[in-house]
Amino acid sequence: MQINVSQLLKSTIGVKREYAIDSTIDLLDDGNVTSIRGNIELIRTNRGILAKGTLHSEVTLDCSRCLCIYNCPLTINLEEEFFPVIDVVSGTSLPAPEEPDSFQIDEHHILDLRDAVRQNALLALPMKPLCREECAGICPECGSDLNRGLCQCANENIDPRWSKLVESLKTSNKHKEVE
Ligand SMILES: [Zn+2]
Ligand SMILES: [Zn+2]
């Protein structure tokens, strides 16, 4: 995720380099380090280097319905320009670009993708995290995980027209247990 770009900085505008990323990163800064893979293209621009590509990783999230912790795959699209802090040929420091939160290439000509990747990962997070599309959530009454089956509350709130059927199911279940 840290690439020495001194050669690319010496190249003419439009020159491209491809990098295969196969690394690890703590995407959400929460102590969960996951693998990250993909391809990044670095392109020399008039002011610096444009990093462009798609990376695949995953983050640990809380399901918004059942509150369980699950691994959510994440596709991170990156397109950020990085600006050198010093001139690669003369070694003199360069004025900071007008954009306030722009990404920098440090004085050793290292382009560090990690902050840019983290920022773009935040944009890729789901608005409503779900452990799976059909997650049943938790019972608002007793808090039990409905993915593991219905709780007692479901029986109490059942439509009276169905209660006979529920009762007979219960008794047949009991018979099974006895067997
Ligand atoms: Zn869930
Ligand atoms: Zn319940």
Image: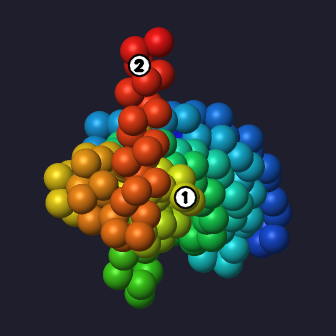
Q: Is residue 5 above or below residue 121?
A: above
Q: Amino acid at mark 2?
A: Glu
Residue at position x 47%, y 22% from top?
A: 176
Q: Residue furthest bottom?
A: 98
Identity of the residue drawn at 74% across and 64% down: 43
- Crowding at dot 1, Cα within 10 Å, few <14 / some 14-19 / many 20+, comes out as few
Determine if the C-beta at disc 1 is less than 8 A from ligand 1.
no
Count up the numbered dots. Answer: 2
> Is residue 42 left or right of 66 when viewed as pictured?
right
Residue 20 spot, x, y in % from top left:
74, 41
Q: Position of residue 175 (x, y in %)?
A: 43, 24
Q: Which residue is mark 1?
A: 134
Whether 83 is drawn above or below 100: the answer is above
Residue 38 falls left or right of residue 155: right
- The amino acid beneath tag 1 is Glu
Residue 69 sits in quarter: top left
Numbered disc 2: secondary structure: helix
Disc 2 Cβ-to-ligand 2 distance below 8 Å: no
Residue at 43% across, 45% down = 168
Quarter of the image with the N terminus in it: top right
Secondary structure under the numbered disc 1 in the rendered image: loop
Taking 101 as reference, is 69 above or below it? above
Q: Can the viewer see residue 167 in this picture?
A: yes
The residue lying toward the viewer, choosing from 74 and 121, is 74
Q: Which residue is mark 2?
A: 177
Question: Along the line of sight, which residue is nearer the eye, 141 or 53?
Answer: 141
Real-space CA distance between mark 1 and mark 2, rounded to the nearest whole angstrom = 30 Å
